[in-house]
Image (cartoon, rainbow, N blue to C red):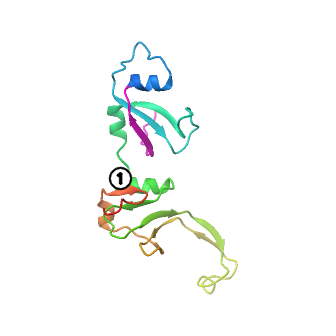
Amino acid sequence: MGTYIGTKLVKLRPMSRQEYNDYRGWTLPANEDGADLGYLVEYTDGGKPNDPRHQGYISWSPKAQADAAYRPADGLSFGLAIEALKMGHRVSRRGWNGKGMFLFLVPGSRFTVNHAPLLGIYPEGTPIDYHAHIDMKTAQGEVVPWAASQTDMLADDWVVGLAPAGC
């Protein structure tokens, strides 16, 4: 069996094993302890919903395993923020002063040269591979290329979406 590490954006609701079985309308198996603490886990990033009350696939996870695998999405490391970007989410930092600032991933693409500034560097019609990169929406509403500082890379105040106002 291979070894894997995963990064998912999930929703967690505290729920004992018995509460989860009751929620699903199931009988608790005789060899399981209904008092076990854990979470209803909803996977929102893919998978067919298996319960009409939820938009994603749900399951139950013991508390210790869930607490080791997941952390709140409002105090992320830079690495987890990058993973969120790769999944298509916007990210921002609590430490940023500007309102409405966030980062987003611009996927790579291919286009042909047909106007300046590339026309004159490359002949018209030249195919160009435009590599994926990260852009920032600034507080002024502009979009600019973004490069991480040492402070950004070592920060643990990254959030999925916009940081709360006043942070």
Q: Residue at x 36, y 70 (%)?
A: 98
Q: Is-magenta flag for residue 2?
A: yes
- Residue with the mark numbered 1: 74
Question: Does 23 sit above or below residue 113?
Answer: above
Magenta segment: does it hold 99?
Answer: no
Residue 98 visible (yes or no): yes
Q: Secondary structure at mark 1?
A: loop
Residue 143 versus residue 68 in the image, above or below: below
Q: Outermost residue, bottom direction?
A: 120
Q: Position of residue 154 (x, y in %)?
A: 29, 60
- Which stretch appears magenta? 1-16
**Mark 1 Cα shell of 10 Å, populated few (<14), some (14-19), many (≥20):** many
Q: Quadrant of residue 111?
A: bottom right
Residue at 36% across, 59% down: 164
Image-based side of 59 in relation to 72, left or right: right
Q: Amino acid at mark 1?
A: Asp
> Left of 69 or right of it: where is 49?
right
